[in-house]
Image (cartoon, helix red, strand yellow):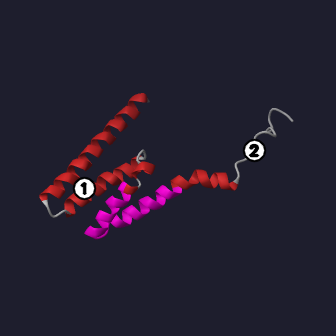
């Protein structure tokens, strides 16, 4: 064995291991595709989009593409809401999330 060859101790990841590593990305892609379809739909589908995003917030809440769609979903639901109180609730939640996302973006870029 030479320094240029792989050692016997290093093994290639199995198909199952590679599949597990790719699963979160694939799951996120599927979720985001579904959210895009709901975003273009009826008022009820826009509400469903927000609910679906909120249900997946723990798993994908650190992903900027996910967060951007969550903010947009709050805006969508605000726009389709019929009462002033409901509009206010969704506007405040969306604005708070947007502010937090902006702070995360600033912190990330200040480290570069």
Q: Secondary structure at mark 2?
A: loop
First reached walking from the N terminus: tag 2 or tag 1? 2
For image coordinates 75% across by 44% down, the residue present is 11
Location of residue 34 (image quadrant)? bottom left
- What residue is disc 2 on? 11
Q: Secondary structure at mark 1?
A: helix
- 35, above or below 71, in the image: below
Number of numbered markers: 2
Where does the N terminus fall, quadrant-wise? Answer: top right
In this view, the residue in front, 57 or 101, is 57
Q: Which residues are magenta?
A: 26-54
Residue 100, magenta (yes or no): no
Location of residue 2 (image quadrant)? top right
Q: Which numbered disc covers residue 75? A: 1
For image coordinates 35% across by 50% down, the residue present is 68
Could you tell me residue 21's position as x and y percent? 59, 50
Q: Main secondary structure of the magenta part?
A: helix
| Apparent side of residue 106 relative to residue 10 in the rendered image (left or right) | left
For image coordinates 56% across by 55% down, the residue present is 23
């Amino acid at each position: 064995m030479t320094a240029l060859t792989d050692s016997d101790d290093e093994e290639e990841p199995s198909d199952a291991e590679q599949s597990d590593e790719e699963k979160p990305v694939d799951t996120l892609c599927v979720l985001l595709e579904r959210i895009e379809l709901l975003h273009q739909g009826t008022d009820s589908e826009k509400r469903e989009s927000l609910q679906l995003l909120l249900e997946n917030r723990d798993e994908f809440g650190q992903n900027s593409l996910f967060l951007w769609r969550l903010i947009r979903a709050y805006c969508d639901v605000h726009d389709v809401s019929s009462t002033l109180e409901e509009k206010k609730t969704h506007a405040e939640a969306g604005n708070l999330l947007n502010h937090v996302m902006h702070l995360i973006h600033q912190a990330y870029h200040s480290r570069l």
